[in-house]
Image (spheres, grey):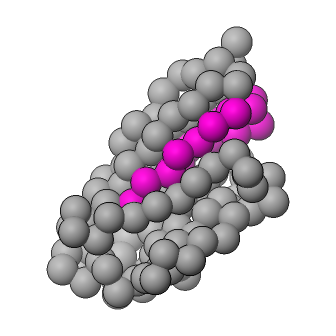
Amino acid sequence: QVQFVESGGGLVQPGGSLKLSCAASGSSFSIYPMGWYRQVQGSARESVAIIDGKGRTSYHDSVKGRFTISRDNAKNTVYLQTDSLKPEDTAVYYCNTVPAGLGGTSWGQGTQVTVSS
């Protein structure tokens, strides 16, 4: 079973950048499409970026041109480079397979991103 540990969040001013990391345990990580999701308290979790096993990517319209997803299968890690951050990007960010739960995966603790002056 694959488990995820997200890190790299923090408090940043508008226009700033953060690089989020998601370390996955389990040997089957590389076969799954992976995604970054975010959730604002009281709202549904939404997908913001996806990367498949061949490195093809797709993004939510709200983050296109500002966020970049990547993966290093040798390190069992998925990254999300977030640039030009806006207050509306404030959320808890999670990673998971796409769709979520493939192979019995569960949600990690997430990492909080707060964009505020």
Left or right: where 86 falls relative to 70: right
Q: Residue at x 74, y 29 (%)?
A: 87
- Closer to the camera in the image, 84 or 41: 84
Q: Residue at x 35, y 86 (%)?
A: 31
Q: Residue at x 46, y 35 (%)?
A: 9
Query: Which quarter shows the N terminus?
Result: bottom left
Residue 87 sits inside the magenta stretch:
yes
Left or right: where 33 falls relative to 47: left
- The residue most toward the top is 117
Say whether residue 38 is visible.
yes
**Is residue 109 positioned above or below 10 on the image?**
below
**Is residue 99 positioned above or below 111 on the image?**
below
Q: Residue 18 placed where, x, y %?
A: 51, 34
Q: Residue 115 placed where, x, y %?
A: 65, 26
Say whether residue 107 is visible.
no
Q: Residue 48 placed where, x, y %?
A: 65, 60
Image quadrant of residue 20?
top left
**Is residue 102 positioned above or below 7 on the image?**
below
- The residue most toward the right is 61
Residue 79 sits inside the magenta stretch:
yes
Image quadrant of residue 82?
top right
Query: Which quarter shows the C terminus?
Result: top right
For the image, the number of numbered tags is 0
Q: Residue at x 61, y 63 (%)?
A: 49
**Is residue 18 positioned above or below 45 on the image?**
above
Q: Which stretch did the figure color magenta?
A: 78-93
Left or right: where 53 falls relative to 93: left
- Closer to the camera in the image, 113 or 85: 85
